[in-house]
Amino acid sequence: MATEIKERTDTPTPELHIAPLSDAIGIKVASIDVRRLTDAEFQRIEAAWLQNCIALFPGQSLNQQEQVAFAERFGPLGQLINKHEGRRDHPAVMYVSNVREDGKLIGVLPDGEMWFHSDQCYSERPCAATMLYAMEIPSKGGNTRYANMYRAYEALPEPMKRRLAGLKALNAYDYDANPTQAGPIQRPDAPHYVHPVVRTHPVTKRKCLYVNRLMTVAIEGMERGESAALLAELYDHQERPEFIYEHRWTRGDLLVWDNRCTLHARTDFDASERRMLRRVIVLGDKPY
């Protein structure tokens, strides 16, 4: 995925069924088995995904090895950064789950609402993509909301674009203290990194906003009050309804999103109901 691509203008073959997922973001690829995609079919899907941020593949039946193999088609796999006590079958795999085995959680982030964020934005090389596979789903809630940061940036007034040019922001994640909603960073060793407020996608070369409500702490070199005010304005802007699609999970859904141009969040759900999704991450580049 190192070459620049252009907006897809051709019509997909009837067998592939690539369609818009929503007006805001995403594609849906129906009636296929991701384990059996040819290289040509995958390349068509990847090109559409790169321009539209997320891709949904409903009706899949995947074991861990098969999910990992499909994720590897998007690039080398990444590794988990925050340590946890859940199931660790593979360095790139994590379960997002409230399910317990022998009285212990097998996954992470078991319950509650989770604010908008970009995975691993607090590291030098945040993951390029995240892939979630739905295994057990509550009767309602626990939806994932996706926000299109290409469109969020493009909708900014020109004076704001000029103001943001060259700015960098500190991103940090205190998993132990504030895993789902932002709060004071308690751990001095919490993972953190400074990245551009506006990043350029390494493949599409499009610009997108790269700050988020959960993990962005402050704009580098800016007075505290001014930084907080500017970030609050950007958060409100990037979370506008016209940039967002909310996905209600169905068992067998496989969804992959591009972390370089997409934010995601989770809605609340009944903690007494089981929820389990298997996550695989793809290694990314240092943002610029």
Image (cartoon, rainbow, N blue to C red):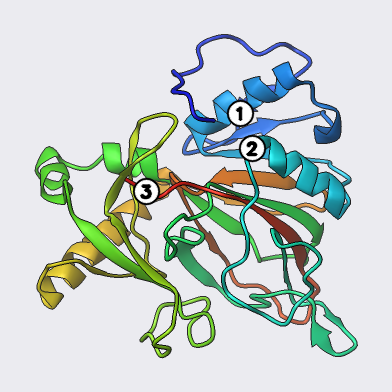
**Element on which disc 1 rests:** helix
In space, the residues marked 3 and 1 are separated at their CA atoms by: 20 Å
| Of residues 73 and 279, the one drawn nearer to the viewer in this rendering | 73
| Of residues 111 and 246, the one drawn nearer to the viewer in this rendering | 111
| The disc label shown at residue 287, or none | 3
| The disc label shown at residue 74, or none | 2
* Circle 3: residue type: Pro
**Element on which disc 3 rests:** loop
Above or below, 95 against 43 in this view is below
Q: Residue at x 52, y 78 (%)?
A: 179
In space, the residues marked 2 and 1 are separated at their CA atoms by: 8 Å
Between disc 2 and disc 1, whose residue precedes? 1
| The disc label shown at residue 166, or none | none
Circles 3 and 2, Cβ within 8 Å, touching? The answer is: no
Q: Is residue 24 left or right of residue 11?
A: left
Pinpoint residue 188: horizontal percent, then vertical percent. 39, 87
Q: Pointer 1: what residue?
A: 46
* Circle 2: residue type: Phe
Pinpoint residue 243: horizontal percent, then vertical percent. 41, 44
Q: Residue at x 49, y 29 (%)?
A: 2
In space, the residues marked 3 and 2 are separated at their CA atoms by: 18 Å
